[in-house]
Amino acid sequence: SSIFAAVEMAPRDPILGLNEAFNADARTTKVNLGVGVYFDDNGKIPLLAAVKAAEETRVKAGLPRGYQPIEGNPAYNSAVQQLLLGKDSALIANGQVITAQALGGTGALKIGADYLKRLNPDAKVYISDPSWENHRALFESAGFVVENYPYYDAATRGVNFDGMKACLKGLNAGSIIVLHACCHNPTGADLNDAQWGEVVAICQERGLVPFLDMAYQGFADGIDADAVAVRAFSASGLQFFASSSFSKNFSLYGERVGALSIVTAGKDESARVLSQVKRVIRTNYSNPPTHGGALVAGVLASAELRAQWEAELAGMRDRIRAMRTGLVDAIKATGCAQDFSFVAQQRGMFSYTGLSAAQVEVMREEFGIYAVSTGRICLAALNTKNLDYVAKAIAAVIK
Ligand code: PMP
């Protein structure tokens, strides 16, 4: 018999499964609020003008397609460090930061997880409850036991910060804490500056290992404003990990552009840590692809393109904000008694709407509006044409 005869069907990815159902839906009024992708007001994934310009320059140059170094494009890696830590970072100047280009934010998390497993095989990993749906599976597949720390408080639609702190204070030294640096996915609820300061202090006291996941830098308040958590850790003297993704803020999803950065205690340590991270990369995919990283590096190296990118990023951020307030107002305008103003306070692409799985199901069946069964919707999939339709559907299902 076949060596595959006993293979079971793996469960479908919940969000990608939603896309398949959406694509098969014949209704012209259908709306997909399930995916984590930024669409413009016409419902299209934008190709940023700054990216297009960098791409044209690169294509014109007609470069050969040699291998990159194992850790990727040096200009790109250095640009990533500056975005995360600021261009005047003492850590960068001291050689305390290493960065490896990676295949998206996911690839960065996986290289980091594999390296952490070699560094500290007995550590446990703690993720927020709830978290990005891939965090648990990713760290488990690296061999870790993964637990939750309290995070979302459904009653206040904010962070259960006391619960989170109490949990972190009880963890063993060396525990790995995965933190959403900004624009928490899926809840849209972030810590404030003072709370980040407290988390940093707890990590210091308890000897925890922070892993900051930065997938939406620039989607809440701006490049530097959204790096407050990273900057708080960088000022603390702690060692930490950070993953970056440029899928959203450069709209480069399929090019798989991300990076893993690690802050060490000094230059000599950096060299040793980088050498180990390179072994992880070498035995996985040898070295990263060139194109996406070169585009990001090209944009960030040119004052003109960088300004253009920042303006385009601000445009995406402002449009999401406008959809947040627009949704709140449009739901109110239906005469709906429930207050949705929390949607305008949440940050980034997502909102936990508080809709139940049953209500999400009715939205899909009766209105062709697709959302994750947890009630998570992607605000960046709303536009001026579908906003009222979605607002009316939400008002109808919560009656
Ligand atoms: N972390 C979080 C919190 C995410 O939401 C995502 C998905 N955008 C990722 C990591 C993965 O990013 P990428 O698509 O670049 O792999």
Image (cartoon, grey):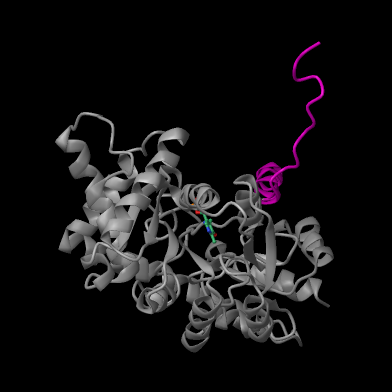
In the foreground, 138 or 38: 138
State the extent of the magenta-drawn residues as a range.
1-27
Picture layout, residue 110 above or below residue 209: above
Q: Is residue 44 visible?
A: yes
Picture mark count: 0
Query: Does residue 202 appear left or right of residue 261 in this picture?
Result: right
Q: Is residue 18 magenta?
A: yes
Picture layout, residue 307 above or below residue 190: above
Residue drawn at (21%, 67%), measured in percent from left and top?
Answer: 93
Query: Does residue 151 appear left or right of residue 302 in this picture?
Result: right
Picture layout, residue 223 above or below residue 66: below
Residue drawn at (31%, 40%), measured in percent from left and top?
Answer: 291
Residue drawn at (52%, 85%), measured in percent from left and top?
Answer: 198
In the foreground, 263 or 81: 263
In the foreground, 141 or 366: 141
- Relative image position of residue 314 (x, y in whole percent): 36, 71
Q: Is residue 51 visible?
A: no
- Relative image position of residue 151 (x, y in whole percent): 66, 75
Q: Is residue 35 magenta?
A: no
Query: Does residue 247 appear left or right of residue 136 in this picture?
Result: left
- Relative image position of residue 237 (x, y in whole percent): 37, 75
In the foreground, 394 or 297: 297
Query: Does residue 374 appear left or right of residue 183 in this picture?
Result: right
Quarter of the figure with the N terminus: top right
Residue at the top extreme?
1
Quadrant housing residue 328: bottom right
Quarter of the figure with the C terminus: bottom right
- Relative image position of residue 307 (x, y in whole percent): 22, 67
Picture layout, residue 198 above or below residue 269: below
